[in-house]
């Protein structure tokens, strides 16, 4: 991992939160290299003990937030509330769930109860 070109951008949070280093590294590389997000920033979520990301999909202006986690982690409603608080209460956050086989599934989370679009 240390030899990868993206490591310097993540090294501070990888050493600060080693338990979530794999999902942070995997999600960053998916967003930056595969999906080619623009203006991708690495953020610290100290109350959730992990890093997260803010950026834009290609050719869009919407600022999006992504919080990586592992499929094996147990998360709570209070954890989600704290993530929204730490990120400045955005309208929604994408939870990037990483599995051991390198798959990532993104779930769009919104605070409260939100009626789905028709």
Image (cartoon, rainbow, N blue to C red):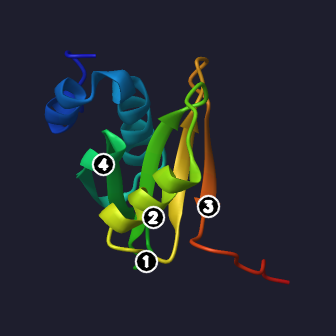
- Closer to us: 113 or 66: 113
**Upstream in sequence: badge 4 or badge 1:** 4
Q: Is residue 67 left or right of residue 44?
A: right
Residue underneath mark 4: 47
Q: Secondary structure at mark 1?
A: loop
Q: Secondary structure at mark 4?
A: helix
Of pointers 4 and 3, the one earlier in the residue sequence: 4
Expressed as whole percent of the image width and height from the top left, the position of residue 45 reads 29, 50
Badge 4 crowding class, 10 Å Cα cut-off, few under 14, some 14 to 19, many 20 or more, is few
Residue 108, numbered label: 3
Nearest the eye: 37 or 68: 68
Q: Is residue 54 visible?
A: yes
Q: Which residue is mark 1?
A: 62
The alpha-carbon separation of the residues under discs 4 and 2 comes to 26 Å
Q: How far apart in space, not on screen, are marks 2 and 1 (Cα)?
A: 8 Å
In this view, the residue in front, 19 or 22, is 19
Q: Is residue 14 above or below residue 110?
A: above
Q: Residues within 10 Å of mark 1 (few under 14, many from 20)?
A: few
| For residue 116, above or below residue 17 | below
**Residue 73's mark?**
none
Q: Position of residue 66 (x, y in %)?
A: 44, 54
Cβ atoms at labels 4 and 3 below 8 Å apart: no
Residue underneath mark 2: 57
Q: CA distance from mark 4 to mark 3?
A: 20 Å
Residue 65 visible in the picture: no
How far separated are the C-alphas under marks 1 and 3?
A: 14 Å
What is the C-alpha distance between the residues marked 3 and 2? Answer: 14 Å
Give whichever of discs 3 and 2 has the lower sequence position. 2
What is the secondary structure assignment of the residue under circle 2? loop
Tally the marks: 4
Residue 17, image x and y in percent?
26, 29
Mark 4–mark 1 distance (CA, rounded to whole Å): 25 Å
């Amino acid at each position: 991992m240390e030899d990868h070109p993206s490591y310097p951008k993540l090294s501070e949070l990888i050493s600060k939160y080693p338990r979530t280093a794999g999902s942070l590294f995997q999600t960053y590389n998916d967003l930056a290299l595969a999906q080619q997000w623009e203006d991708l920033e690495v953020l610290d979520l100290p109350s959730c003990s992990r890093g997260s990301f803010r950026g834009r999909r290609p050719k869009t202006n919407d600022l999006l937030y992504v919080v990586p986690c592992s499929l094996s982690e147990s998360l709570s409603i209070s954890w989600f509330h704290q993530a929204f608080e730490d990120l400045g209460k955005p309208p929604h956050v994408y939870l990037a769930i990483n599995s051991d086989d390198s798959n990532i599934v993104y779930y769009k989370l919104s605070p409260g109860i939100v009626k789905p679009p028709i």
